[in-house]
Amino acid sequence: QVQLVESGGGLVQAGGSLRLSCTASGTFFSILDMGWYRQAPGKQRELVAVFTSGGSSNYADSVKGRFTISRDGTKNTVYMQMNSLKPEDTAVYYCNANGLLRSMSTFYQWGQGTQVTVSS
């Protein structure tokens, strides 16, 4: 009922930039929070940044000052601008969204993931 489609990953040199996008589609009533998680090989999935329904944004300490999350509510899209990328940012990045379906039940959805690779 809710699909998340991500784009914008790729290969970049250390110090470079990438911009990720994630668009939600389907039959839902509203989206509350949208954000990004990442999972590196052999590690657990971790929160990178989230844009809440209240308009605030939260970041992992490791990306503060380098990554910026933004949201276009009219397009049900969340973006993440990633600057000053480091090799340790290499991971599969997953979009996540939660909200309400038209039935007023909640949803919690993941995107398929997009690979970000930062070379040293």
Image (tube, rainbow, N blue to C red):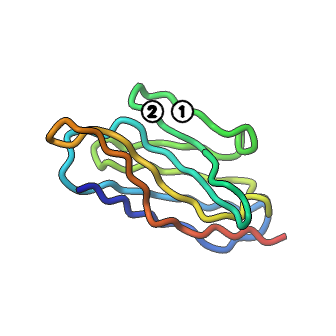
- The residue identified by callout 1 is 57
Residue 29 image-quadrant placement: top left
* Direction right: furthest residue: 120
Could you tell me if the residues under marks 1 and 2 are in contact, i.e. CB atoms within 8 Å? yes
Give, as a three-letter code, the residue at label 2: Thr
Q: Position of residue 71 (x, y in %)?
A: 42, 42
For the N terminus, give its image quadrant: bottom left
- Residue 99 appears left or right of 89: left
Q: Position of residue 23 (x, y in %)?
A: 36, 56
Q: Could you say which disc has been placed on residue 52 in the image?
A: 2
Q: Which of pointers 1 and 2 lies earlier in the amino acid sequence?
A: 2
Give, as a three-letter code, the residue at label 1: Ser
**SS at badge 2:** loop
Closest to the observer, 102 or 115: 102
Q: Position of residue 3 (x, y in %)?
A: 31, 59
Residue drawn at x 70%, y 62% as measured from the top left = 40
Residue 102 image-quadrant placement: top left
Closest to the observer, 95 or 23: 95
Residue drawn at x 61%, y 72% as measured from the top left = 10
